[in-house]
Image (tube, rainbow, N blue to C red):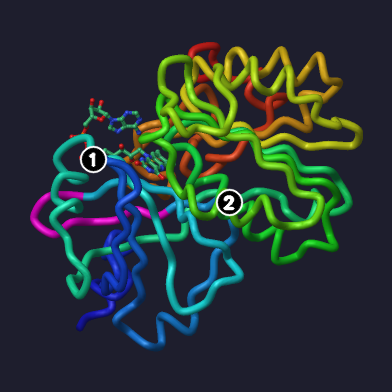
Amino acid sequence: MSDVMTDNIYQPDLMEVVQVRQHTPDVRSMRVRFLDEDKAKAFSFSVGQFGIFSAFGYGESTFNICSSSTWKDFIEFCFRRTGRVTDALWRVQEGDTIGFRGPYGNFYPMDAWKGRNLIFIGGGIAMPPIRCAIWYALENRKDYGDITIVYGARAVKDLVFRDELEEWAKHERVRVVQCVDPGGETSDWKGEIGFVPAVVERANIPADDAIALVIGPPIMIKFTLPVLAKMGLADADIYTSLENRMKCGVGKCGRCNTGPVYVCKDGPVFTLEQMKTLPADDM
Ligand SMILES: Cc1cc2nc3c(=O)[nH]c(=O)nc-3n(C[C@H](O)[C@H](O)[C@H](O)COP(=O)(O)OP(=O)(O)OC[C@H]3O[C@@H](n4cnc5c(N)ncnc54)[C@H](O)[C@@H]3O)c2cc1C
Ligand code: FES
């Protein structure tokens, strides 16, 4: 192979799909590993980064890496079936090969968060990008204070990684609050009923020396931010991850830019303080 080909930044690595899990009627996660052993050994990433995954013959899509960076030999991503590429990925089975480029973007400052209380707030399909940080914090438990996880979806059937939510709740100084929108509960539902911002407000979450990572639909984020402000969190301590449409993933094509930043390179992780300097419709 010529140097030109090996240096091609858009050339995906080949990944074997080793596990497919179905979470909801339209959400699956996949565990993939590099076919090339040397690449597998050399690969590392930080929680919060994303990858560009390809279904050959159909195209590429951007997904957060939702496994912890402490897990070796494989990475995981979770996707909602929504269009051309995700339809093709939906047909992929264990043993098949897909493409992967990455890791790309910045990451959650897990080192800077050491010693702080962590508040994770997610809505719907936004649990996967938070999941990697939760596992990372649990695997480095002594580095962090209290952990509160508030996770909501429209209905019980839309909650993802439900088994892991139960598992996280068993850890010391970890509180998991699950909620579904009114009408989305089942007869055996034991969690809260209400929209995420209201549930956060009534949950009496200790907010001293806390950081919050909030990811979800824009409407959820919009109404959660004032609640966090009321709890005393500073804008610099509230983080989110943006999902602007991307193409190259590496700051070349301009597809993802908002104001002066390329979300793929300068983000996707931003504090509310940073978000306030960006054009208003990006949050
Ligand atoms: C940094 C980043 C991280 C992401 N992480 C995840 C993740 O972990 N899991 C996940 O399911 N999705 C994630 N997304 C969104 C995901 O990339 C798109 O849903 C996916 O590319 C759709 O591809 P498609 O070809 O199947 O859909 P298309 O056929 O391209 O589009 C189908 C529908 O989805 C909409 N759509 C496509 N891309 C986006 C987007 N970026 N934001 C909002 N709507 C979009 C289109 O407008 C259209 O209505 C992420 C996006 C970014 C930029
Ligand atoms: S996706 Fe091309 S510049 Fe960000």
**Viewer-nearest residue: 11 or 22:** 22
Which mark, by number, is residue 81?
Answer: 1
Q: Judging from the image, what secondary structure is the residue with disc 1 in?
A: loop
Q: Is residue 73 part of the magenta span, yes or no?
A: no
Which span is picked out in magenta?
Answer: 51-59
**Left or right of residue 10, residue 218 in this image:** right
- Residue under the image location 50 percent in, 42 percent down: 127
**Amino acid bearing label 2:** Glu
In the image, residue 171 above or below residue 224: below
Q: Judging from the image, what secondary structure is the residue with disc 2 in?
A: helix
Numbered disc total: 2
Q: Are marks 1 and 2 in contact (CB under 8 Å)?
A: no
- Residue under the image location 91 percent in, 33 percent down: 208
Which mark, by number, is residue 166?
Answer: 2
- Residue under the image location 28 percent in, 78 percent down: 3
- Residue under the image location 54 percent in, 54 percent down: 164
**Amino acid bearing label 1:** Arg
Main SS of the magenta part reads strand
